[in-house]
Amino acid sequence: MPADLPQAPPGPKPKPAEKSQAQKLLDKLGLSRPIDLALHLPLRYEDETRITRLADARDGDVVQIEAEVTHCEVTFKPRRQLRVKVEDGSDSCVLRFLNFYPAHQKTLAVGARVRVRGELRGGFIAREMVHPSFKLAGGELPAGLTPVYPTVAGLPQTYLRRAVQSSLARADLTETLAPAVLTTLPSGQRALLGLQEALQLLHCPTPDVALAALEDRSHPGWQRLKAEELLAQQLSQLEARRIRAAMRAPALHAAGPSGHSLHAQLRQALPFALTAAQERVSHEIDADLQKSLPMHRLLQGDVGSGKTVVAALAAARCMDAGWQCALMAPTEILAEQHFRKLIGWLEPLGIQTAWLTGSQKAKERREALALIESGAAALVVGTHAVIQDKVRFKNLALAIIDEQHRFGVAQRLALRSKMTAGGQEPHLLMMTATPIPRTLAMSYYADLDVSTIDELPPGRTPVVTKVISESRRDEVIERIRSQLAEGRQVYWVCPLIEESEAVDLTNATETHEALTAALPGTVVGLLHSRMPPADKKSVMAQFNAGALGVLVSTTVIEVGVDVPNASLMVIEHAERFGLSQLHQLRGRVGRGAAASACVLLYSTGDGPRLGETARARLKAMAETQDGFEIARRDLDIRGPGEFLGARQSGAPLLRFADLATDVELLAWARESAPLMLDRHNALAQRHILRWLGGKADYLKA
């Protein structure tokens, strides 16, 4: 353009192209990159490679037939449905659709020749298929099995199949495993396919591939994906650990003589002796706190094993060195339980403690915030309120998070970011009463040091666990009467129904009314999730004081409630609870000297018997009180995804590998990760990026 001509002013920057509805749905599945789609593997496969004659098909078989429509009508008995009769020359059957559209009737018009696939069942009048897939006949049969992918509403299989095939051609599938790493694979996996070959086979298996090997994931193609996934997880965990090792934290050494330290005074003031396990884990934590590397330790111990006193001793070490400590718990009841214990131990030693929750009055909150910012409060205890923006610490050096699986990654990172001294990191101690099975510790917790309290303090009485049908409810109420007559107290726990707080409240309220009527002269309390915090606090105080004989509650009492006089717990609809949750609830009794019991009251609903999973959970509860055995069985029943709760929020759980069956591959991945990072770092970074994308950052929490 000539220089003397006026140039048009620059226009507004073009807006980024609007995403299509299909792309939004793909994003919902986490499929934003070609490699994501390439790694989006089928749930199952359908064999559309052959046509079966109706006369040759047996009831219960899933078959594909080609037949002519001889009758098509909408009937209204017993309910509105579309009934279509088809014949293939050897026999006939009925296709039945309870949900259908006009397009169904148009395609299935009398005289049309259709290809239908579904499960053949024996009917009252004729054999039938209910909601089979169908299309007009014609065209060649597929050469291989047809993949069926995980999807969401509005994203059809045909679209996903095309998108996956396109992505397989575009994704970078070059080798990221160093030859030295491949040669160390367990002997059973030496014949693994290359990644590209494995993915092509798993997305488009040929008819000669054994369907059973695809479905149980024993095929070499599946083994390759499992090996890659486990290695990516181990690489990211090891890298997170090394990044943390390069950070600095305050080395917490006592400022004065050790004999006069707060830690020593607290030890002397405790009304009980520490168990050998508590001594051992306290030494492990002490050793970490005296280093300038940020501690990143998980303290695990069964219900009632005494984690709080270990945390108090760690806090004392921190305060001895002149720094602040914060303890965060997921519920106000649990936070207050810690607060009461810590005040009882530390206030007589001259330590000021601040209390922070969302339900505080404005004046109390302002006073607490001032104490924290000035450093006058050496210890801060609270709920999520501890990580809010207005909370400013003078010199935070130790963050303790109880029941850490209840917190998301972002919340843990927010607590760590509260430290402002010279760009240092606080030490982090996470606690859990859900013991971590060894395979989980090797995989999801590989970036953590784990301390285990593996014995209970003396004086804890074993809890007898009984599994009883709802039909014997009257016997259970009679058992309650006998406990009350002996001066004991009782918990009655109602299930929390996540879909509806209103139903949850109704269940608890109705149970409270029924027990009040059945136990005249007994004060029955009610505690549920929708009560104001002050009311919850009041009810718990009454139960603690012995003013209530029975406490009807939802699972808000799962953790943090310690009433030694309570000797019986009844868990209603126990089949609805998870195994670790049942174990946590059972841990609320047996805390005193009296013999204690837990009754798991179950209902089979409309069916004749309990489901297999619910039966396995209740059986495990009746057979063992060992939290580690409970955790192992829980992992077997539920898998790692649910077991871990929120720890991996933002980071993907294992999609392909199975920690129960792939232990050899997990051990290989653990051994291979340091070799990859040290000698083949560029390949390691590409491998992490391929499998985790930007989500690996979350592992630093």
Image: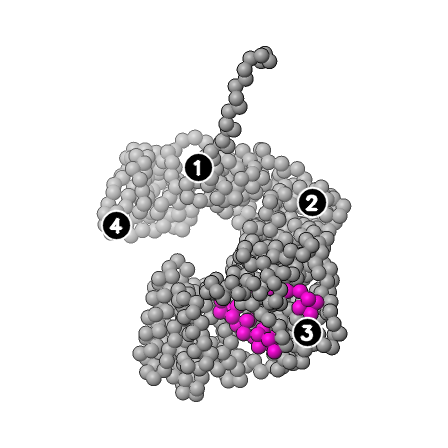
Q: Main secondary structure of the magenta part?
A: helix
Residue annotated with mark 1: 21
Residue 154 horizontal side relative to residue 410, left or right: left
Q: Earlier in the sequence, mark 3 or mark 1?
A: 1
Q: Residues within 10 Å of mark 1 (few under 14, many from 20)?
A: few
The disc placed on residue 263 is: 3
Q: Secondary structure at mark 2?
A: helix
Given contact means CB atoms under 8 Å apart, are the residues at marks 3 and 1 in contact?
no
Q: Earlier in the sequence, mark 3 or mark 4?
A: 4
- Residue 347 counted in the magenta span: yes
Q: Earlier in the sequence, mark 4 or mark 1?
A: 1
Residue 76 placement (x, y as % from top left): 23, 47
- Residue 539 counted in the magenta span: no
Residue annotated with mark 4: 79
Compared to 63, does 332 lie above or below?
below
Please state which amino acid type lies under the numbered disc 3: His
Q: Nearer the viewer, residue 271 or 496?
A: 271
